[in-house]
Image (spheres, grey):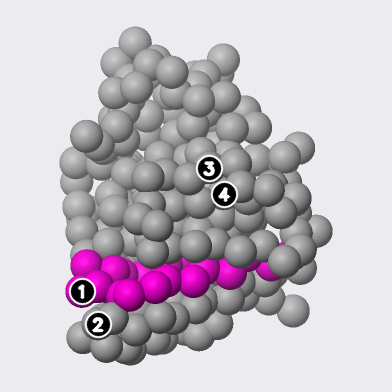
């Protein structure tokens, strides 16, 4: 009964490939996020969706495309993977009326 | 341009003593601040928050202090316990309900038994 879950936990792939990371939350929250934690451990927001609508897009390359089929899911698709995409990607969710974002366990992406 | 800074990458504290983690920010629009705790291979967990209308918020062993004029906040943990060993992230946002959090780079706290 994990609150925010991500799959896969680890992803190793070659440069140029296309990959997806899935996120699901069972908290009934209306807002979901994707964060990237780079090699310097800097945790930075990429996207935020509220009720399936994009509300934050932090100048992320077009190769990254989030998709929210419903408010419990926010998937991240990455085209033409590059070495610099190697990082840990965290999904999170929150409720507008309560503070604090709930994070998933992270997906460690390694691009070779 | 790092708007939230945690200048100590690591800190070691004896069990039972007080742990003090520091955070500085540069954006004067920030008015809501949060602390997250992160264990290895897990996502960050929300710990405690403070609004800029307060200068202190306490929750059990955890207290956050905010000094707006210095643009500085700190997290005090007392007494420190071995389970507190983790990476602590400071985060800030411009207003309650604003989903955009800006995180610091974290401080690794190690509690020595």
Which residue is disc 4 drawn over? A48
Q: Quadrant of residue B4?
A: top left
Q: How far separated are the C-alphas under marks 2 and 1?
A: 7 Å
Q: Which mark is residue A56?
A: 3
Q: Nearer the viewer, residue A112 or B2?
A: A112
Q: Is residue B19 left or right of residue A27?
A: left
Q: Which residues are magenta?
A: A72-91
Residue A41 seen in render: yes
Name the residue at 39% across, 73% down: A79
Sequence-wise, the earlier of marks 2 and 3 is 2
Sequence-wise, the earlier of marks 2 and 1 is 2
Q: How far separated are the C-alphas under marks 2 and 4?
A: 26 Å
Which residue is disc 1 drawn over? A83
Sequence-wise, the earlier of marks 4 and 1 is 4
Locate residue A6, reporting x and y percent.
56, 76
Q: Which mark is residue A51?
A: none
The residue carrying pointer 1 sits among few (fewer than 14), some (14 to 19) or many (20 or more) residues within 10 Å by Cα, namely: some
Q: Nearer the viewer, residue B111 or A87?
A: A87
């Amino acid at each position: 009964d994990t609150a925010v879950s991500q799959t896969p936990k680890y992803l190793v792939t070659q440069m140029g490939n296309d990959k997806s990371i899935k996120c699901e939350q069972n908290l009934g929250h209306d807002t979901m996020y994707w964060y990237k934690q780079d090699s310097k451990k800097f945790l930075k927001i990429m996207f935020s969706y509220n009720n399936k609508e994009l509300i934050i897009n932090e100048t992320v390359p077009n190769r990254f495309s989030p998709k929210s089929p419903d408010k419990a899911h926010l998937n991240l698709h990455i085209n033409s993977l590059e070495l610099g995409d190697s990082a840990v990607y965290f999904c999170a969710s929150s409720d507008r009326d309560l503070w604090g974002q709930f994070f998933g366990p992270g997906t460690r992406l390694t691009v070779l | 341009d790092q708007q939230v800074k945690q200048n100590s990458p690591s800190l070691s504290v004896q069990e039972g003593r007080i742990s003090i983690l520091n955070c500085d920010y540069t954006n004067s629009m920030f008015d809501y601040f949060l602390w997250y705790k992160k264990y290895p291979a897990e996502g960050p967990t929300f710990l405690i928050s403070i609004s800029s209308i307060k200068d202190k918020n306490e929750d059990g062993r955890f207290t956050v202090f905010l000094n707006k004029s210095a643009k500085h906040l700190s997290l005090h943990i007392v007494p420190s316990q071995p389970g507190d060993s983790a990476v602590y992230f400071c985060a800030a946002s411009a207003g309650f309900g604003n989903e955009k959090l800006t995180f610091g780079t974290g401080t690794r706290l190690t509690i020595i038994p």
